Amino acid sequence: MPPSPPLRVVQWATGAVGGYALRDVISRPDFELAGVLVYDPDKVGVDAGELVGLGATGVRCTDDVDEILALDADCVLHMPLPAAYFGGDPASDVEAVCALLSSGKNVITTAGFVYPRAHGPRLVERLEAACARGGSSLHGTGINPGFMSDLLPLALSGLSGRIDHIYVRESSDYRGHPSRQIVTDLIGFAREPKDYAATVRPFRAFQRALFSESVQLVAHALGVDLDDVEESDEYDLAADEFEIAAGVVRPGTVCASRWVFSGLVRGRPLMTVECVYKADATRVSRWAPPGFAVHIQGRPSMAVAIDEVEHGLAGAAAHAVNSIASVCAAPPGIRTVLDLPLAVGRGTVRLA
């Protein structure tokens, strides 16, 4: 049987996650890079391989959306910063995704869409209509949500005879993150307390929407209807001045935050997701150290800890890339982790 031709892949955005994904696509023989969309004018016209420190590919970056829509491609890795992060119109991300789906391209995105049904029938109908027009599929993923707060607890639930509560914790260290736009303008580190609430308002809304998808997906898979998803957050202030990759954190400014999302049934939490973000985990002792944890209370009770995921953004990119083949093979429509086979690192093994 002759080998299948490589799947033609478009990389949409080449930031922190997209850059890792672009490297993976270029490096694997089962994929052929079809195009790259960028937002930075300085990247327009640059060879995609040279952009990420690899050899020339012959594919040059463009900022022309119509050019991307016209390409013959199997899949688009859609990895921009969500518009809602900075108070933009979330509908712009929906419009872009629908245009790609309608053009006949499958879409894997890290900008939400993990479980669109959490946002009601209108969004689902719009996305499904675009999939029907293009004969394409949509899959939302990431490291959290997408894997840690969705796939991992569901996998563990297969060992359960009774589930009383699911708890997932992420603790992330932003010490080495170079983007001031993310670290200060979005998450709010190095902000005065009086400025913090206004700064993170768009981020708060997006976080609630995103993790609502996650807990709704898990509840749906377990056959439970949630009554509500509650969100709360708090922050900590720096005692001393210290420097991180994105700038200087001064005493009395925000240096860490803790977010909690709870899916409730009759006033009791079925699932709780805790997210801790630290400007520098070596300088902030409050709350959990970096890593991930999943606890399931029930029969039997279980606890899984992942002490470190080095380069978590690379993991998010890899999970998307490793999902390309199954998404391209899936029937048209919205495809969550409940609809697809397990994404594994096929084609990634490098033996010495």
Image (tube, rainbow, N blue to C red):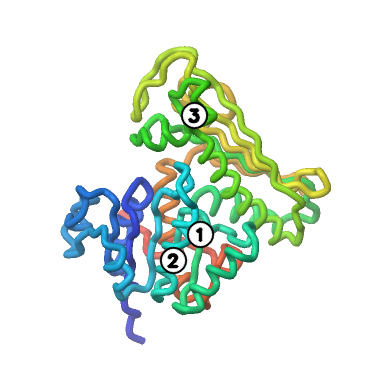
* Residues under numbered marks 2 and 3 in contact, where contact means CB atoms less than 8 Å apart: no
Write down the residue under mark 1: 140
Query: Percent x, y for residue 173?
Result: 46, 32
The amino acid type of the residue labelled 2 equals: Val
Amino acid type, label 3 = Lys
Q: Position of residue 144 (x, y in %)?
A: 53, 48
- Quarter of the picture holding the C terminus: bottom left
Q: Which mark is residue 278?
A: 3
User: Disc 2 or 1, which lies upstream in sequence?
Assistant: 2
Q: Position of residue 133 (x, y in %)?
A: 47, 79
Q: Please say whether residue 350 is visible from this viewpoint.
A: no
Q: CA distance from mark 1 to mark 3?
A: 26 Å
Q: Is residue 195 left or right of residue 260?
A: left
* Residue identifier under label 2: 107
| Quadrant in which residue 31 is drawn | bottom left
Q: Residue furthest right?
A: 266
